[in-house]
Image (cartoon, rainbow, N blue to C red):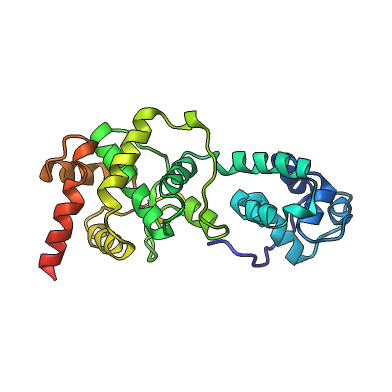
Amino acid sequence: METLESKSENITIEQIYTILNNYRIGKKPLAKLLGWGETTIIRYVEGDSPTNEYSDKLRMILENPGYFYEILTKNKDNITQVAYRKCSKAVLKQMLQSRICIIAQYIINKRKANISLLELQTYLYYIQAFHLALNNSPMFEDDYIVNDDHMPYEQVYNDFTTRKITELEIAEDVLSRTEKEFIDQVLLAFEWYGPAMLKSLITYERVMLRISRDKDNRKIVSKDSLKLHFIDIITLYKINSVKDVHNYPDQRFLEIKELR
C-alpha cells in the first residue's frame, strides 16, 4: 500500500501540470480542494519548491486517481459546481482506465458496494482463472502477485486502501454482454461464502500454484501458470462452461473441511 511517506525527490512542475490536465482542474480550485492557500499551486508551477508533505500529497494525487476522488467528494463545496462536475468526470475516467479497475467496479456495483476488499480480490482471481481455463484468454492483463495479505492485484489494492468502496457509474459498453454474464456467473458461484471461507480456499489453493518472478523480482503466479492449474480444476470438477463453476467451491469446501 502506498502512503504519504517522504519521497527522495519533490514533485516536478511537469507532474503538477499533468495533475491539472488529467483531472481538468485549475490551479486555484486544486489548492482550495486541498485546503491550501489559494496561490499555492500557482507558486509551485512558477518555481517555488513544495514542502515534502505537500509534494508527497501531490504525488499521491498524480499516481492514484482514487485517492484524489476521495478528496474531491469530501471537499467539493470548496469549489464551484461547474468545476466539480468537470473534475469529477475526468477523475472517474482516470480511475477506470485499466481493465482490472473496470471489472472491479462492475463487481462493486453488482454488490451495491456491500463487499470487502478481500472478497473483491478473490472474485477477481476466480474470474481471471476460470476465464483463462474455459476461454483460453485473460479477462485482464495483471498477474497474480503473491503476498501474505491475499491481495494479489496490487492496482486494486492500492486504489481501495486510499478510498472507500462505493458505487460509481461506468459506461454500459466498457464490458460486453458476454463478459458481464461470465462475471455474474462466477460471482453467483462464490458469493454464498463469506470472507473467512474464501480466505481459507485461496490459502489452501496457493500451495499448489507455480510461483515465478516478474521483471521487478516480485513473486507472481503468471497467467499461463494460472491457466494450467485451472484447466486441471475444470476437468476434475466437471466444469464444461461458466454455469458449472459452482461445482468447484461447493465440492472444494467439503474437501477442505474433511482434511481438518
Locate residue 19, reporting x and y percent.
Answer: 72, 46
**Residue 218 in view, yes or no:** yes
Residue 152 lies left or right of residue 47; in this view the side is left
At 10% across and 66% down in the image, what residue appears? 258
Nearest the viewer among 16 and 190 is 190
Q: Quadrant of residue 238 in the image?
A: top left
Q: What residue do we see at 48% from left, 52% from top?
A: 156
Seen at 51% across and 55% down, the residue is 165
Q: Is residue 82 above or below residue 175?
A: below
* Residue for point 16% across, 40% down: 239
**Can the viewer see residue 145 in this picture?**
no
135 to 147, vertically: above or below: above
Q: Is residue 25 above or below residue 136?
A: below
Corner quadrant of residue 164: bottom right
Q: Position of residue 140 (x, y in %)?
A: 41, 39
- The x and y percentages for residue 158 are 52, 56
> Which quarter of the rendered picture does the C terminus lie within?
bottom left
Residue 28 appears left or right of 59: right
Residue 67 shown left or right of residue 85 in the figure: left
